[in-house]
Structures are given as C-alpha cells and as structure tokens.
Amino acid sequence: MSDSSYLDWPFFEDRHRQWAAELDTWCHANLDQEHTETDTDDRCRRLVARLGADGWLQPTGGNQLDVRTLCLAREILARHQGLADFAFAMQGLGAGAISLYGNEAQKGWLDKTRTGQAIAAFALTEPDSGSDVANLSTTATRDGNDYIIDGEKTWISNGGIADFYTVFARTGEASGAKGLSVFLVEADRPGLEIRERLHTMSPHPLARLGFNGLRVPAANRIGEPGQGFKIAMSVLDVFRSTVGAAALGFARRALDESAQRCLSRKLFGGNLANLQLVQGHIADMALDVDAAALLVYRAAWTKDQGAQRVSREAAMAKLYATDQAQSVIDKAVQLHGGDGVRKGHIIESLYREIRALRIYEGASDVQKVVIAKNTLANYQPPSD
C-alpha cells in the first residue's frame, strides 16, 4: 500500500485530501494493471473519454487552475499507469493558453476538454528550437482578417489524435521573444499535415506537424499579438511542477513495488529486506521520494497562494523530482533482478516511462539555468 501520510502536510486542504482518496479509489477500479502497449492512440482516446466522463478532467481547464489538484492528480495517475497520467496532463497543457488568456468564445473548448469530448495539444517545440522558445521560426502572417501559418513543429504530444492545437508562431511585432503569438488551430483545417508519427521507448501519441499555408481567423489568436512568449511561460509556470508530480508518482510506485519485493523475496535464509545494503537502498529511495514531494507541493502551494511567477520553485521541483525518480527507479530495477528488465513488468515499464520527463517541458540542464538565474538575481555584485 502506498504511503499517503504526505496528504497531512499543511500544503493541502481537506478538499485536496478528499480528491486524492477518491481518485486513488477510481484508479484501482478502472485502470488496467497490465500496462499493455498495443493501440496507443486508441487507448489514449479511451482514457481521455473515461477520465472526462467520470469528472477527473475538470481541474485541467478554467479561469482558476488549482496547481495542487493538478499535481495530486498526476502523481496518483502516474503511480497507477503512465498513459493515464499522459492523457490527463495533455488536456491541461494543451488547453492551458485558453484557460489563462482565452476569450469567452475560445473557452467554449474547455467544456469539451474537461469532459473528454475533445483532445488538446500544445504545439511549441520545433526541430531547431526546443528549450530556446524565443528562437522558433514557424510564422503567422496577417492577411486581412486571417493569419497564414507556415512552418513545422515536432515532438508534439497528442499529435495526430488531437482535435485542436495551441500553436505558437512568429508574428513579427519585434525580434526574439517579443514577436511571438499563439493560435487555436482546429485539427481539420486545410494546411495542417501530420508529417511523421514519432515512436519512443515508452509509447505515447507523438507527431511532427507541418503547417503549409494554413489559414486561421484572427479571432483564433489567443491573447494579444506579441504575447506568445509570455503565454508560453505562464502555461509552463503552472504545468512544470506537475511534471515533477508525475515523476513522484513513478518513483512512489517503484518504492512500493521494491518494498513488497524485499519483504517477500527469500535470500540467504531470510528476506531480502534483512540485508543492510538493501535497507540502504530502500532508505535512499524513501528519502528521495519525500524530498521530491516537498519540492513539488511547495511549488504548487506557492502558485496557488497567488504568486505571479514560480519559475524558481517549479524548476527546482521538476529538476529534483525527475532526476531523483530516475535514481529511485534504477534502484528498483536492481532490487528486482531479472524481473526488473523483463518486458511487461511494472518496473521495466517505469524505467522506460521516467526518462522522457527529464527532457520535456524544459530539460534538466535548462532547469539549472533557470534556478541559477533566479538565485543570482537576489544578489548584488560586489563593489570595487
């Protein structure tokens, strides 16, 4: 049984504790435990529909995003099944720009994403601009009451199955970060091409997208012209902490499985858990899980208290939780021996799931840059 004592921490209110308990119960009853990897697109569509129908996607969109609820949801879903976490997370990330900056007409999409009737996608990354958002080259050129979008996006989650994409493009109000805008692009618009489906070691719906003279009404622009970078950073400020929460869920599952394994596996006339070196591994895993949880929920609580930006807190949460989850899961593989690398085993699945989290929504090295810049900004250079 997974430890839930962290829910008593002062970061949470009773409504969060109730949400977590009810979602965990739902996951036990509804998510398959076989971790099958066939028909990923279909499984993702069905997960979105099921999560939406049962009310679990409601926190992913709206005028007020409760980051603690988003993090709890991702941690619990990830602990049960990686693809369920993905399905939940992409609804929030894909619709994030609409939740934070959309007009009333655009927010009509939120009724669909929160009920699982539409799938959202966040189209920011390009072949030559991943972490360097200000350097993106996809263009949106004004043409009367429309914009014409040309360019390419890659590593787009839900690419190929989404009903709409929030697309970031250069509109040219200024150079660099100040010349970007964001658009709501329906998936059936002429000029949108699924140029390649991308396959990774842990299957998720991913694609490389092409925009070939795609015409979209100016009314589909989210926010003001030139606000694209600000909008992207605001969305990531909310959802970056949730990536740490997903990593925490993976790590917590690895610890749960390892503890059970060590208590039941017979070795040298006793249980594996009796060996001091094994106890050392379990202690390190438990320490990393709790430390990651403290950083994740500090960032979420800080944002929910009304902080304009939590770039430093969110970067710390994502960096530590994802890096340490990798270490926790690696220890779990070692403690499970051959089973840890057996295809279809939960630990083998976790080992493949965790690696991408140290890359997407800002790679670990980028988080270090963010943390350093925010830390140094609090100091004054020494006087001569």
Image: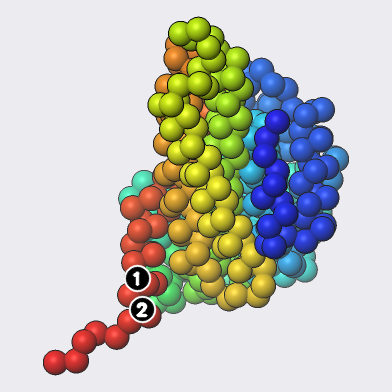
Which structural element holds mark 1? helix
Residue 180 appearing in the image: yes
Instruction: Indicate the position of residue 344 as horizontal and vertical percent values.
Output: 56, 15
Q: Nearer the viewer, residue 219 or 198?
A: 198
Q: Label 2, on which residue? A: 377
Residue type at mark 2 is Ala
Q: Left or right: where does residue 371 sit relative to residue 6?
A: left
Q: Residue at x 24, y 85 (%)?
A: 381
Residue lying furthest left: 384
Residue 130 shown left or right of residue 294 in the figure: left
Q: Which mark is residue 373?
A: 1
Identify the residue shown where x is 53% and y is 28%. 350
Residue 333: image location, x then y, percent: 45, 23
Percent x, y of residue 216: 61, 58
Question: The C terminus is located in which quarter?
Answer: bottom left
**Which quadrant of the figure has residue 359?**
top left
Q: Quarter of the image for the N terminus: give it.
A: top right
Tell whether label 2 touches label 1 (CB within 8 Å). Answer: yes
Q: Amino acid at mark 1?
A: Lys
Q: Secondary structure at mark 2?
A: loop
Compared to residue 347, the image places residue 113 above or below, namely below
Tell me the crowding category of disc 2: few under 14, some 14 to 19, or many 20 or more residues within 10 angstroms, Cα based.
Answer: few
Q: How many marks?
A: 2
**Alpha carbon separation for disc pair 1 and 2:** 6 Å
Furthest residue to the bottom? 384
Q: Residue at x 76, y 46 (%)?
A: 20
Dot 1 crowding, Cα within 10 Å, few <14, some 14–19, many 20+: few
The correct choice, above or below, for 92 with respect to 104 in the image is above
